[in-house]
Every structure is written in structure tokens, then in C-alpha cells.
């Protein structure tokens, strides 16, 4: 139900827009109709600039029925150069045809210059194929051609509308190119905004991932610093133990060993049994001292491994 109401509101706003455009461009065409040029020997053949607003109206009006209103309003003449009804009727079919041509052209993808040239061709066809014959036929039906033939009236119109045709082609073609450029620019801006939004979202996601990686890297660096500190401390302790081991090897071990070696030499040379017993006891004492030192060194090596 809500969708139906929304659709009805959109349609209503479009109808109001079409009505506003039809009234505006119809009145504007009526005013432009006062800029006119007379055709010699043909009292009712006036060329003016009312076609410019009527052609521009087809760009904005979405419902072709409102074109009839524009044509009726464009036929209002304050100075009565042309009869109201024939002037209104002769424009209806040609302008509706141009409206259909514009609806077709605007769906095609082409460059601005190509669209402008194509529209200029449409304007030439509009004048020579639709508007001029419609003018002659309509005025013939209303008995306003003074007995002249169809081709005679047509030749008068072609000769008299050179400046009107040129101005209408130039103004409306440039206007179509302008509208096309504005639409393409609006479309590009819309796509650019969508692209910027997408890139912003991607950058945000990448930033979040980088933040997470930075946190992980920070934690890793912290753990690494801790491990480096622990390993450095362990190496320092090992160096202390190594120095201690080297000191024991060079001082504590060599003392008892030197005494054992000296006492052994004396034992060999001594003949007295009592002296031999004394020296043997001294050697045994030095061996025990050496054994104690070796056990301490073993304990030091074991703690180094742990």
C-alpha cells in the first residue's frame, strides 16, 4: 500500500511538472511569435520564432498530450497576425513527431557533436516534411489559402523561413547538446560519488586491517624484546659460569694437581717408610681436594645446561 501511494505521488508530481512546462513554454512561444517576418504575396504566411520554445518544450514534457496545450497557448496572438485555431492545429502533429524523435535520440549513446548534428537534421525534417505541409493543409482546410496551389504555398514558406529555420536549428541543437552534457555530467558525478564511497569503504577496511596488523606486530615486538632480554640474561649468566669454570680450571684444579705431582716425585725418591706413609697421606688428601673441585665443576656444568 505504501508503494502504491509513493508511485501515485511520483505520477502526480510528473503531471504537475508536465503541466507547468507546457504552460511556460506555450506562453513563451506566444511571445516569440511576435518576432515575425511576413511572406510577400501571401497575407497569412508569417514566419516567426515561436518554434524555438515549442521545440525546447519537448525536452522537458514527458506526456505528449501536454504538447497540445503548449501548441494552443503558442497560438495566442495579441496582434492577430494569424488565426488562433489554424495556428494551433498546424503545430500539434509536427511537434508531437519531434517529441517522439527526441525520446528516441536521448536513449542512444553518442558524442555531443553527433547528437547536435543529428538534432539539426531532425529540425530540417521537422520544417520541410511536417511543419510546412501541415501549415498549407491546415490553412487549406480553413479556407485561408486564397486559391493558390499546395506547391505554390509551400515554395513561399520555404523561401520565407530561411532565417527562422537557421535560428531554430542553431538554438535548439545547442540546447540539446547542453542538456545532454548536463545529464552526462550529472551521471558522471553520481558514479563518482558512488566510486568515492566504495573507495572510502575499501580504504577503511584496509586501515582496520593495518591497525590489526600493527597491534599484532606491536605484541610480537614486545614478546621479541622480552625473549631477547631473557636470552641476553641467560648468555650473561653462562658467561659468568664459563668464567668461573675457567678460573677453577686454571687455579683451583692446578693447585691440588701440582701438589700431587710434586708429592709423587718425592714419594719415588723417599726410602724411609714413615716418610713414604706421610707423603702418601698428603697425596691422598690432595686427591680428595681435587675430587671435590671436579664435583663442583660438574655441578657448574649441569646448572649451565639447565
Image (cartoon, rainbow, N blue to C red):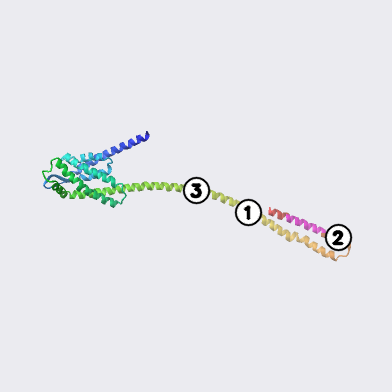
Residue 174 screen position, x and y as percent: 26, 49
In-front residue for pair 303/10: 10
The answer to whether residue 35 shows anywhere in this view is no
User: Would you say residue 8 sits in the magenta stretch?
Assistant: no
Residue in the picture at 27% in, 48% down: 176
Label 1: which secondary element: helix
Label 3: which secondary element: helix
Which secondary structure is most common in the magenta stretch?
helix
User: Would you say residue 289 sits in the magenta stretch?
Assistant: yes
In-front residue for pair 11/56: 11
Name the quadrant of the N terminus. top left
Residue 115 screen position, x and y as percent: 28, 50
Mark-to-mark CA distance, 2 and 3: 84 Å
Residue labelled with disc 3:
209
- Please tell me in which quadrant of the rendered image residue 273 appears: bottom right
Residue labelled with disc 2:
278
Residue 167 screen position, x and y as percent: 21, 49
Q: Are marks 2 and 1 in contact (CB under 8 Å)?
A: no
Q: Is residue 280 above or below residue 183?
A: below
Residue in the picture at 19% in, 45% down: 131
Residue in the picture at 74% in, 60% down: 251
* Numbered range of the magenta stretch: 284-298
Looking at the image, which residue sits at the far top?
A: 1
Looking at the image, which residue sits at the far right?
A: 273
Amino acid at each position: 500500500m505504501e508503494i502504491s501511494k509513493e508511485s501515485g505521488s511520483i505520477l502526480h508530481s510528473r503531471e504537475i511538472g508536465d503541466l507547468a512546462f507546457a504552460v511556460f513554454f506555450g506562453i513563451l512561444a506566444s511571445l516569440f511569435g511576435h518576432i515575425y517576418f511576413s511572406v510577400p504575396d501571401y497575407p497569412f504566411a508569417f514566419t516567426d520564432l515561436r518554434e524555438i520554445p515549442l521545440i525546447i518544450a519537448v525536452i522537458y514534457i514527458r506526456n505528449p498530450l501536454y504538447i497540445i496545450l503548449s501548441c494552443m497557448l503558442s497560438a495566442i496572438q495579441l496582434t492577430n497576425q494569424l488565426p488562433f485555431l489554424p495556428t494551433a492545429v498546424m503545430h500539434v502533429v509536427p511537434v508531437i513527431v519531434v517529441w517522439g524523435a527526441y525520446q528516441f535520440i536521448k536513449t542512444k549513446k553518442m558524442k555531443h557533436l553527433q547528437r547536435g548534428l543529428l538534432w539539426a537534421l531532425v529540425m530540417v525534417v521537422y520544417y520541410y516534411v511536417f511543419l510546412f505541409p501541415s501549415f498549407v493543409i491546415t490553412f487549406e482546410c480553413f479556407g485561408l489559402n486564397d486559391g493558390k496551389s499546395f506547391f505554390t504555398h509551400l515554395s513561399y514558406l520555404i523561401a520565407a523561413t530561411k532565417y527562422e529555420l537557421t535560428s531554430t536549428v542553431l538554438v535548439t541543437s545547442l540546447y540539446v547538446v547542453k542538456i545532454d552534457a548536463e545529464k552526462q555530467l550529472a551521471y558522471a558525478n553520481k558514479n563518482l560519488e558512488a566510486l568515492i564511497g566504495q573507495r572510502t569503504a575499501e580504504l577503511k577496511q584496509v586501515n582496520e586491517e593495518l591497525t590489526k596488523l600493527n597491534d599484532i606486530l606491536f605484541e610480537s615486538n614486545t614478546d621479541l624484546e622480552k625473549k631477547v632480554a631473557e636470552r641476553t640474561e641467560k648468555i650473561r649468566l653462562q658467561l659468568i659460569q664459563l668464567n668461573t669454570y675457567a678460573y677453577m680450571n686454571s687455579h683451583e684444579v692446578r693447585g691440588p694437581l701440582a701438589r700431587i705431582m710434586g708429592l709423587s716425585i718425592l714419594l719415588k725418591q723417599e726410602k724411609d717408610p714413615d716418610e713414604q706413609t706421610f707423603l702418601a697421606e698428603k697425596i691422598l688428601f690432595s686427591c680428595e681436594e681435587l675430587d671435590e673441585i671436579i664435583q663442583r665443576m660438574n655441578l657448574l656444568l649441569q646448572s649451565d645446561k639447565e
